[in-house]
Amino acid sequence: SLEKTDLQQFSTPLPIAVSAAKAADVRAGDVVLEPTAGTGHLVASLDPKDITIQMMELSPRRARLLENLGGYQVKEGDYLADLTRKESADVIITNPPWGKYTTGKYGVPIGVKFTPGDVAERFIAKNVRDLKPGGRLVAVMPTTMLGPRGTEFRVYLRQNGAIRALIKSPPDAYRTRS
């Protein structure tokens, strides 16, 4: 749909989503944030019983869908413009939009000590800011971050946390099915 294209909505395939949730090592009492919630795949395998799951979604239609599912705290809006979340989450699980940062669609990175080469890097810099000290971030990222254009970003990550794993998606994991 036009909304899917305009908002770069590509749902995370369930096997990748479940693996990301497992990698996050969610524990009782954790506040889990999914800042680009889409249809909720990344947190669908989590049991909301002993944790708080917060979701943010840009699309009003998808935000209402998530609210109707129940068990989640859903906020409709632009995650990058939301300045209320600093150090608010124990865990962030995300699949941010991907693409060249130079389009200007996602604003200027405020307080970031590197020049993002991909939009996803801008989202992750905000995620790092929004984690509580000692928090955990699991992000489904484009492979461009592994190339020469991602060097500054990888340095930023090493300076602001510990990278535990880089796992490549299976070939054709995001192939659109008709």
Image: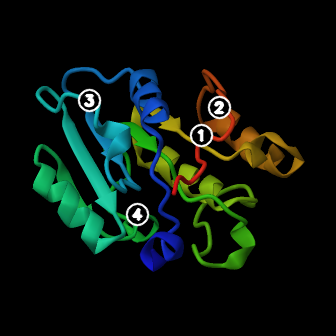
Is 83 in front, or is 74?
74
Label pair 1/2, CB-CB below 8 angstroms: yes
Residue type, label 1: Ala
Earlier-in-chain disc, 1 versus 3: 3
Q: Is residue 105 left or right of residue 100?
A: left
Residue type, label 4: Tyr
Give the residue pinned by disc 3.
46
Earlier-in-chain disc, 2 versus 3: 3
Give the residue pinned by disc 4.
79
Residue type, label 2: Pro
Give the residue pinned by disc 1.
173
Instruction: Tell me the quadrant of the picture where the N terminus can be found.
Output: bottom left
The location of residue 51, given as percent across then percent down, is 18, 31
> Which element is circle 3 on?
loop
> Which element is circle 2 on?
loop
Q: CA distance from mark 1 to mark 4?
A: 25 Å
Q: CA distance from mark 1 to mark 2?
A: 6 Å
Give the residue pinned by disc 2.
170
